[in-house]
Amino acid sequence: MSEEVEETGNLTDGFHLVIDALKLNDINTVYNVPGIPITDLGRYMQAAGMRVLSFRHEQNAGYAAAIAGYLTQKPGICMTVSAPGFLNGLTALAHATTNCFPMILISGSSEREIVDLQQGDYEEMDQLAIAKPLCKAAYRILHAEDIGIGIARCIRAAVSGRPGGVYLDLPAKLLGQVMDADVGEGSLVKVIDAAPRQLPSPEAIGRALDVLKDAERPLIILGKGAAYAQADDAIRTLVESSGIPYLPMSMAKGILPDTHPQSAGAARSLVLKDSDTVMMIGARLNWLLSHGKGKAWGETPKKFVHIDIEPREMDSNVEIAAPVVGDIGSCVEAMLEGMGKGWKKPSAAWTDAVREKVESNVARMAPRLQNNNVPMDYHGALGALRTIIKERPDAILVNEGANTLDFARSIIDMYQPRKRLDVGTWGVMGVGMGTAIAAAVETGNPVLAVEGDSAFGFSGMEIETICRYNLPVCVVVFNNGGIYRGTDVNPAGEDVATTVFVKDARYDKMMEAFGGVGYNATSPDELSQAVNAAMDSGKPALVNAVIDAEAGTESGRIGNLNPQSVVAKK
Ligand code: OXT
Ligand code: ADP
Ligand code: MG
């Protein structure tokens, strides 16, 4: 930090205006990797009482910011240096936009005049142009007096309507621009009502209720938009008063506890096929729901009611009989009011059929979860972790991998909203450590990160970050020695197969290198003991969970998406 700044009495500059503008809007946490031209910005932020967490790679800082936005409804901030740092942060910005998480990627950039003439500046790149197609909005601020307005525009763009990623370009020169401190203060903008409620029209609510009234086998699908909306009580009341079975998408698990009698999570195939009317709340009919048509949806013709804040989501894949456009809290409350007291619940024939399927699937899985096999299979290992989440329902479960993800989703019951954080709409490997760090920082809750060994490798260096900030994160690496399985063989040549890693790797030693506690677990009992000890301690820990290399399947439950070669089949 330079002395001059402290001596300059009634002057301010770009650095301090950025900080004041963020703080004025209640943004006090930044996830970043320092370097030219933003190193001092991070230092001044810390000096001004903001929490600035430094990562080992911008992509992980970006994933942290994205999930911070999801958890708090305020834009998560990722800050990077120019060109390479910016590009490293960009995947996370695109991920935030794709998942409808509010986030702002703030990147320093090089001198405009030199960049635009392509004269070879330090880290020269037209970052604004590159960011634009990957986010909801992209802005550049050139004058210190515009910082207040610029940051206000970023905040509003990130959180209003359908939330998403926003890019903010801060050229190095801007940060050093000086102006009168009072004028500077007067230029700041406090954003009023950044995400205004959007009330659905009474006609839309009436239409939706009419469609539901006619339904014989209705289903509610809850998506992560419903979890984001933080309308937990209203959603629970709607589900319970309607009596309709509900299916939670992966990150919507826990809005109502997975053990709820109306949960159809364990009867997914049946309810998609046999329902005749489906009310979507904060979920899209994208690939994760087979686009609302085809084999997974069976022969029964469907009518859809769709609650979403984004009007263009309606009819995106199939016809929507009753579009309800508005914020989920307002829409769900309006639906509840319209249903009134005399609402006729669905027939017992339908709800009993769903319940029976749930119970038979749960009963079929139960004995497999009790096994204490060595080496562990997914059911044995996840059976142990399932009990731990049941006993610690406020812990946040972070989950990525292929088999590790898919098995954990169906095996580990969630009991509270926004406690399951995973790979999201794109199925991105590498979100794990950034997500775990932000979850701990934003909520203060304990975090259990259940990671495939490949998935962990994408962001594994951030365990140093976890140790540095002494966060209550227990990472469990499901070590099956590879991507999907550890058994692939290269039929030609000396290299190992493309999906195979070093055998018998000890990821726990990595954690020990940074002062955290490492455990090696070879059985479900050992796993359970290690995770309980780690979570009791509240200290950074990593458990290397040795999983049978033969246990998984190619691509987990989405192997059907792999294209097939005719030549290879011959
Ligand atoms: O009803 P039916 O009978 O059908 O049964 C269903 C439920 O009713 C039932 N169920 C239950 N039964 C009993 N009890 C309970 N409680 C219960 N709950 C449910 O179980 C079944 C299944 O239920 P589910 O899961 O709800 O339903 P289903 O059919 O699976 O749902 C469909 C989907 C599509 C919604 C679901 O499958 C889903 O959400 N999938 C997400 C998949 C995903 O996103 N995967 C990640 C990407 S895979 C791949 O791309 C990978 N890569 C490439 C790569 C990526 N992704 N990113 C980057 C940056 N680079 C490269 C890589 C490298 S994965 C990967 C690494 C993998 O290796 P790892 O080592 O990390 O991991 P391992 O595989 O473990 O080795
Ligand atoms: P999932 O992957 O769980 O199915 P998606 O990410 O596909 O969920 O869908 C989330 C949806 O929620 C998006 O279409 C988004 O527009 C919507 N959404 C997000 N926040 C709100 C909100 N507050 N009110 C209404 N809709 C919302
Ligand atoms: Mg693996």
Image (spheres, helix red, strand yellow):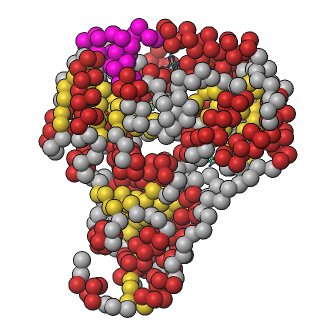
222 and 284: which is toward the camera: 222
Quadrant assignment for the N terminus = bottom left
Residue 257: % across, % down: 53, 29
**Which residue is drawn at the image coordinates 33% and 68% (left, top)?**
49
Tell me if 403 is positioned left or right of 512 in this view.
right
Q: Is residue 107 above or below residue 461?
A: below
Residue range in magenta is 365-386
- Extreme residue in the front direction: 341
The answer to whether residue 360 is visible is yes
The answer to whether residue 132 is visible is no
Instruction: Dividing the image into four quarters, tell me where ligand 2 lies.
Output: top right
Tell me if 353 is positioned left or right of 86 in this view.
right
**Which residue is drawn at the image coordinates 34% and 15% (left, top)?**
380
Report if residue 226 lies within the magenta region.
Answer: no
Q: Is residue 45 above or below residue 372?
A: below
**Which residue is drawn at the image coordinates 73% and 29% (left, top)?**
242
Q: How many marks?
A: 0
345 and 300: which is toward the camera: 345
Residue 355: % across, % down: 62, 14
Q: Is residue 482 above or below residue 183?
A: above
Q: In terms of secondary structure, what is the magenta stretch mainly?
A: helix
Tell me if 270 is positioned left or right of 367 in this view.
right
Residue 451 occupies quadrant:
top left
